[in-house]
Amino acid sequence: MKKIFILMAIVMSVSTANAQAIYVLPNGKSIPIRLATEVYSNVKSPIDVKAIVDADIKDDSGTEVLIRRGTPVVLDADIKKARGVGKPAFVQLNFLNTTSVDGQIIRLQGGYNKRGESRRGVALGVGLGVGLTVCWPCMFCLCIKGDTVTIPENRVFNNVVVNDNYRISTTR
């Protein structure tokens, strides 16, 4: 009889040691995102842009970690090269989702856009203005491209937020 009580006490203590607590990750909670790769607009082959969560995301009381630092972030990168007639390069990053400590997909909302400086006025002015009136070889100035865009590695984006309310379970 004593063995049964001791066995029950051990089972109860082990089951309470692995108790799970439920925490809420609220809609609109800010998630800092860090770029893990450099984004350069004028590359020959497409680049795989990678990003991670920059800091531990904790519950409202600040005791339990809901999303760990270094968790990969899925993002969509739209990169357009600079083109002739002064058209600038363009980079758009949309942060889509990440993963919580219990394996849930956490949808994110936010992004970043950057456009290079346009050189359309110079290309058209010199190419057409001088090329048609004075010296026809100046028509090649229409090939002038706009500025490129570079976003350095380790850039942190703080304008990304959680898109919905999530209930995340953690083990104590």
Image: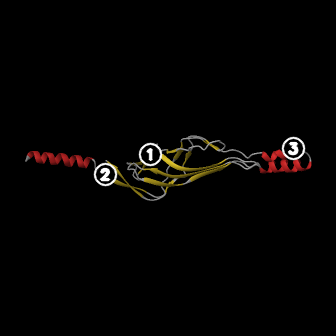
In the rendering, at what x and y percent does residue 54 appear? Answer: 49, 44
Depth check: 159 or 48 in front? 48
Q: How packed is label 3: few (under 14 Cα within 10 Å), some, or many (20 or more)?
A: few
In the rendering, at what x and y percent does residue 142 appear? Answer: 80, 48
**Three-letter amino acid code at the position of disc 2:** Gln
Q: Mark 3 or mark 1, which is nearer to you?
A: 3
Q: Are marks 3 and 2 in contact (CB under 8 Å)?
A: no
Relative horizontal placement of residue 120, taking residue 67 as reference (left or right)? right
Residue under label 2? 20
Query: What whole-number distance in Å separates the C-alpha atoms at marks 2 and 1?
Result: 19 Å
Q: Earlier in the sequence, mark 3 or mark 1?
A: 1
Q: Residue at x 10, y 45 (%)?
A: 3
Q: Residue at x 8, y 46 (%)?
A: 2
Q: Secondary structure at mark 1?
A: loop
Residue under label 3? 137
Q: How packed is label 1: few (under 14 Cα within 10 Å), some, or many (20 or more)?
A: some
Q: Are marks 3 and 1 in contact (CB under 8 Å)?
A: no
- Which of the numbered marks, if any, corresponds to residue 38? none
Query: What whole-number distance in Å separates the C-alpha atoms at marks 3 and 2?
Result: 75 Å
Q: Quadrant of residue 25?
A: bottom left
Residue under label 1? 56
What colouring does the structure picture have?
secondary structure
**Three-letter amino acid code at the position of disc 3:** Pro
Depth check: 63 or 78 in front? 78
Instruction: Pick out the residue farthest to the right.
Output: 134
Q: Residue at x 75, y 48 (%)?
A: 84
In the rendering, at what x and y percent does residue 37 appear? Answer: 56, 41
Instruction: Pick out the residue farthest to the left.
Output: 1
**Three-letter amino acid code at the position of disc 1:** Asp
Q: Are marks 2 and 1 in contact (CB under 8 Å)?
A: no
Q: Earlier in the sequence, mark 3 or mark 2?
A: 2
